[in-house]
Image (cartoon, rainbow, N blue to C red):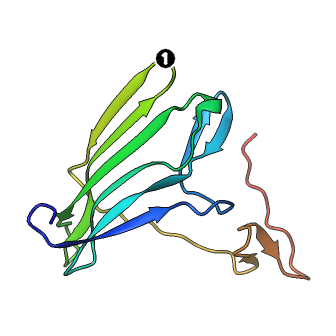
Amino acid sequence: MVDGRPVIPIHFAHIPGRRTPAALALRGRTYPLDLQGTAWLDRVTDNVVKVEANLLRDMSDVGLRSLDLHVEYKSISLKGISAPMMLPALAEVNVSTPKQHWRNTHAFDHYRTFSTDVEQDSNVKIRAENNKPEISPGDSAPESKEKP
């Protein structure tokens, strides 16, 4: 039970060799973060209610002793959207290095919706494996719109 809701705990761990959505930027380099943890899903709606995660492997070689994450979600009603959405309400991040410890707490509220318009050049094809634009044979390259 989490906040009076019946939940299903789902344990996860990063699969070695696969891409990770989390990274540490340090001294001009980016280090992938291999995380493990538990996500609690609402047993009725399957929405994420809470996530806790930490490092899967030691990263002391780059000065990161520990990284612990705690994220709580809550149901948010947004203007123009009929059903409430489960969105992050609170995130706590604890980081330890050989010389320091940080604890950052982020509260998320006042969510708002927005919209945007997007156009895709029909001559530019996107390949899923690397997301680089591909120009079909016979097409001319798109013009660069750089400012001087």
Residue 37 locus on image (x, y percent): 41, 56
Q: Quarter holding the N terminus? A: bottom left
For this orientation, the residue located farthest to the top is 99
Q: From the viewer's perspective, tell me whether residue 12 is left or right of residue 128.
A: left
Residue at 16%, 62% (x, y): give it: 2
Instruction: Give the quarter of the image for residue 59.
Output: top right
Residue at 36%, 60% (x, y): give it: 38
Residue on which the image places disc 1: 99
Q: Nearer the viewer, residue 123 or 21?
A: 21
Instruction: Give the quarter of the image for residue 127.
Output: bottom right
Q: From the viewer's perspective, tell me whether residue 14 is left or right of residue 51.
A: right
Assess disc 1: are there few (<14), some (14-19) or many (≥20) residues with their C-alpha within 10 Å of its C-alpha: few
Residue 133 locus on image (x, y percent): 76, 69
Q: Quarter holding the C terminus? A: top right
Residue at 19%, 78% (x, y): give it: 82
Q: Nearer the viewer, residue 21 or 14?
A: 14
Q: Is residue 89 above or below residue 98?
A: below
Q: Nearer the viewer, residue 85 or 5?
A: 5
